[in-house]
Every structure is written in C-alpha cells, then in structure tokens.
Image (cartoon, grey):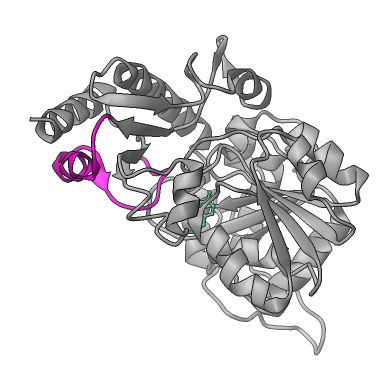
Amino acid sequence: MNWNDAKFETKAIHAGQDPEAKTGAVVVPIFQTSTFAQPAPGEHLGHEYSRTSNPTRDALQDCLAALEGGVQGLCFSSGLAATHAVLALLSAGDHVIAMDDMYGGTFRQFDKVWRRHGLTFSYGDLRDPGVFDALVTPQTKLLWLETPTNPMLKLVDIAALSAKAHAHGVLVAVDNTFATPYLQQPLALGADIAVHSTTKYIGGHSDTVGGAAIVRDADLGARIAFVQNANGGTPGPFDSWLTLRGVKTLAVRMERHCQNALAIALWLEQHPRVKQVIYPGLHSFAQKELAARQMRQLNGQTLGGGMITIILDGELAHARTFLSTVRAFTLAESLGGVESLIEHPAIMTHASIPPEQRRAIGISDSLCRLSVGIEHVSDLQADLDNALKAAFA
Ligand SMILES: *Cc1c(COP(=O)(O)O)cnc(C)c1O
C-alpha cells in the first residue's frame, strides 16, 4: 500500500511495513540472512545478497523515505557512513561549502579523510545566506548544511540556501539529525538530500548506531544506492529492525522532547547561575522567525527540538562539578534518546575541532549541551537545580 497521502504519525507506523506476505506477520521480521536462494541461476525473488538489499533494511528505508517526503531512502551502519556515501558522489578537485558549526565527526571526516582524497572545503557562518555567494566557486559541487547546528543551535535558511545553490548547479545536503523529519522537512524546503544519524532521535532509544540518506530525485537515489552497495557500509537486519521499531513512536516522542525542553529552557533562563540559554523555541532565540518558518508549530508554539545549549556563569571547574553531580541526566556523548543526557562539547564531542576554531564559534569551557529526554519534567528540573547548587556552593 502507498502511504504517501497519510499523515506523519501514520506513515511512521505503516510506510514500508505492510504485513509480511507469506505469514501475515504484523511486524516486519528480522531477515537475519546474508544470502537468498535462487530458483534458477540469475533468477531471484527480489533479493540476492544482504549488502545489496535485505527486506528488513528495505522496510526501514521505505519508511524513512516516506517520512522525509523523498522517493528513496538509503540506510547505513552509522550517520558518518551515510555522510561518507554522500561525499563519495564527488571527485577529486570538487569543492564543498559547509557550515562552520557542525557535528565534530562530520568536520573530522571532511578535514582528515576527504581532503586527502582531493576534495576542498570552505566553511562559513551560513546564518547569513550571502556567505554562500562569497564562498561558491566553479568547482563547488555540494553545500552541506546542518540546522539546528551542534552545539550552538544556529539555524540556516534551507529554502534560501537551496535556491542559491541550485542556481550554481550545486547539490544541497541537510543533516536533519537534530530536528528529525517530524520537526523539519528539508526536501520540501528545496534540499536534495536529507541525512541522518538514526542513532539519535529516529532510533530514539540509544540502543543502536545507524545512518540514512533520503533523496527526492530517483537518479540521485540510484547513485547513492550504487555507493551503498559498492562501499558496503550497510546496517545489519537487527539494527535496521531496532531503528524501525524506534521510528514508529517518533512523533509522540518528539512532542514530549520539545515540551520538556521548552519548560527546562524557560526555567534555566531565570536561573542566576546560567548566563545564556540557547533554544530555538524561546522568545530570546536570535533566529526565532526562521525557527517558526522552518520548524513545526504546535498551537502557535515553535517546536524547537530536544536540545538545549547553556553557558554557565562560571569556569570549567563549575561545569565539571555540575556535570559530575547530575543523576537524572546521564553524562554521556550522543543525544536523542528517551533518557536525558548532558555533556561538555569542548572536552567531549567537539574535542576534534581545533581550540581556536572552537572558541571562534562560541564553544567555551562553561558551555554544556543537554539532550532533554522524556522523563517527567519535574524530576529533570530538580536534578539540574541540585547540580547547579553543588557547582556553585
Ligand atoms: C551523531 C551525529 C552524526 C554522526 O552519526 P553517527 O551515527 O554517530 O555516525 C552526524 N550528525 C549529527 C548532527 C549527529 O548528532
């Protein structure tokens, strides 16, 4: 059945997930097999070998394609493997423009792997779309966006930048990990590729690592599918199944993540020991008009996601005590799971970014990143309150 006309919540549960033809199993089975019997040489029943295709992975790919409004989804063994597959479309000499504030591992892959293979990169603060005009060259082939960015939660105008890029024949990829397709639809805004670390909100339960790239053009889909099979960074059937099980509840989880995060952000804004709270759902958020235009609204409120970045009114030592005292929040890298996590980007997730560049984008030693989970908000707030008291005792 085609679920294209269904609402998001319905697609999450049904797209790509029709009852299994042979047994009627309501849940897509885990086809834990590497290969498929052929009735005669060269004749197969739709699958030959699980790197190339596997029914459990196909179900996840079709579901994610439906959720992002694309024609094809390709899944990978990690978010960075998905990024790698997109960059593998390029050739030596090609130029890429990317946001100056982005996931540290993406920067590391661009800077330490792809540059050695002859790609060149320019980074800019694309909050001002005019920066693209200053960076674009005849060699530019890809614009890599992340919005909201990690960890400064800067937004970039996907529609404006896609129009500019397409005028130069430049492909646009958006890392949609922080927003998820529930809050933001890059392909509808003009981007060519939506990229995910499904490890985060899409999987949602911190129990598997995975990635995806979703496209709205069949030719581009075929090119990435070729890389997926040729390079082979595919997820196994069980990881695909876990991710598919997670995605079914994406809409309800995201609403609660956003509701909890907004309440915590409003409370932190009033806290005397917190110098700054960055959250796209706040009135104080610098780009609140763009957030309202580009991200989902519910009852007149922008759903700003589950990530909050705060700057404490203190030094590294205060941040260390704060982060070592929390209990309802777990001190860990990663984000987007049902449980709340907290971390210190300068020491943890963004340590691979050179210190000067970190400082330039605002990642100071008193900056902490919160991934607000779906526990009861009053427990989360009490935990932060207690840890702030300990840090500034
Ligand atoms: C985690 C993350 C990635 C990388 O994904 P992995 O699944 O860890 O490889 C890429 N982009 C963003 C925004 C992320 O948060």
Quarter of the image where the C terminus is located:
top left
Q: Is residue 314 magenta?
A: yes
Residue 84's spot in the image, x, y percent?
Answer: 64, 67
- Residue 240 placement, left or right of 162: left
Nearer-the-camera pick, 43 or 85: 85
Quarter of the image where the N terminus is located:
top right
Q: Is residue 34 above or below residue 337?
A: below
Which residue lies at the image location 76% right of the left edge and 64% below the top edge? 224
Image-quadrant location for residue 387: top left
The residue segment tinted magenta is: 313-338
- Residue 91 placement, left or right of 47: right
- Residue 121 placement, left or right of 332: right
Q: Is residue 59 magenta?
A: no
Image-quadrant location for residue 14: top right
Which residue lies at the image location 57% right of the left edge and 58% below the top edge? 211
Residue 245's spot in the image, x, y percent?
Answer: 48, 49
Q: Is residue 163 above or below residue 345?
A: above
Which residue lies at the image location 42% right of the left edge and 44% below the top edge? 363
Nearer-the-camera pick, 154 or 176: 154
